[in-house]
Image (cartoon, rainbow, N blue to C red):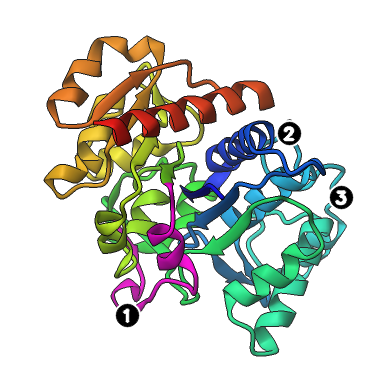
Amino acid sequence: MTHITVLSGGVGGARFLRGVRAWARQTHPDGAGGSTAHITAIVNTGDDMWLTGLRITPDLDSIMYTLAGANDEERGWGRVGETERVSGELKAYGVGWPWFTLGDLDIGTHLARTHFLRSGMSLSAATERILQRWDIGVRLLPMTDDEVETHVVSDIDGTEMHFQEWWTRHRASIPAREFRQLDVERSTPAPGVLDAIAAADVVLVAPSNPVVSIGTILGIPGIRAALAATSAPVVGVSPIINGSVVRGMADACLQTIGVATAADSVAVHYGSRAAGGLLDAWLIDEADAAVASHVEAAGIATTVVPLWMRDVPTAKQLAADAMDAATRVRSL
């Protein structure tokens, strides 16, 4: 059996995982519409928060809805066919964040999760229980069962706010001084995370936000060491195409840590695994072919392929290209 482990967060990660699953079903069919390949996604939970008494996990839910075919493709997040009557009532009572609207179907997921957590389950156990409803063909693991919420420190007056306030309410328009993952130093990887890295035949780094998604996963004690020790090639996909972010406002995050919004700059930020960094190989778009030599000079094997995931077939091809890059790394 082929074991594929993916570090993921957000919408870009969800769409990439959909392509990985499609690739696995085509190349490793089980005869019943599924795959004999085993895919595990280690998912960022730094965006999580408590709101109106509910535990909200944006990245886990985005990935789950996307793989279940229940997401809103037009908006890129949330459930298709949503209504927002409950959020309207909460606003009328002055409860919660009026700028953070939860759909009614989505609230059902949050209620279920909160029930399981209040019953004594860990986040990973609650996630496994919730996934029993959906046939997604991918194992989802939160990066940790601990609460490691990302906060943003304003570079204007030093005030601190939850990442979601900075991202959703302010659209990353407030210059950030730093990102803080609360209590990250006391956190531990969720059960199964380190095993998924150690047992992997290939580790893929999705085109997710390098700072507050992938960077947060890497900040959990023990995960970097596991990635350094795994015998699997580690292949990343650039979230930057032609000097622009594919989705969201990752450029504002990169600016905060002093990294240019460029495919080669993000690769160098991650670093070569041979030199103590993360990557063995890196995929960049055809529009960035001119910087491939910069990435190669940093000790990271580089492949130039189309990166835009416009639909499932293009996402599947991107997954195939990533797996081919892993094969080339193994042959070196």
Q: Residue at x 67, y 43 (%)?
A: 77
Could you say whether the residue bearing mark 3 is in a helix, strand or loop?
loop
Cα distance, mark 3 to mark 2? 15 Å
Q: Earlier in the sequence, mark 1 or mark 2?
A: 2
Front one among 142 and 262: 142
Determine whether 29 is above or below 139 in the image: above
Which amino acid type is shown beneath numbered disc 1?
Arg
Cα distance, mark 3 to mark 1? 39 Å
In the shown orientation, is residue 135 left or right of residue 57? Answer: right
Query: Which quadrant of the rendered structure holds the C terminus?
Result: top left
| Residue at image mark 1 | 186
Q: Residues within 10 Å of mark 1 (few under 14, many from 20)?
A: few
Which amino acid type is shown beneath numbered disc 3?
Thr
Could you say whether the residue bearing mark 1 is in a helix, strand or loop?
helix
Asked if residue 95 shows in the view, the reply is: no
| Residue at image mark 2 | 73
**Residue at far bottom of view:** 120
Query: CB atoms at circles 3 and 2 under 8 Å apart?
Result: no
| Residue at image mark 3 | 83
Q: Residue at x 36, y 43 (%)?
A: 210
Q: Which residues are magenta?
A: 179-201
Query: CB atoms at circles 3 and 1 under 8 Å apart?
Result: no
Which amino acid type is shown beneath numbered disc 2?
Glu
Q: Nearer the viewer, mark 3 or mark 2?
A: 2
Q: Residue at x 73, y 44 (%)?
A: 30
Give residue 153's quadrant in the image: bottom left
Q: Earlier in the sequence, mark 3 or mark 2?
A: 2
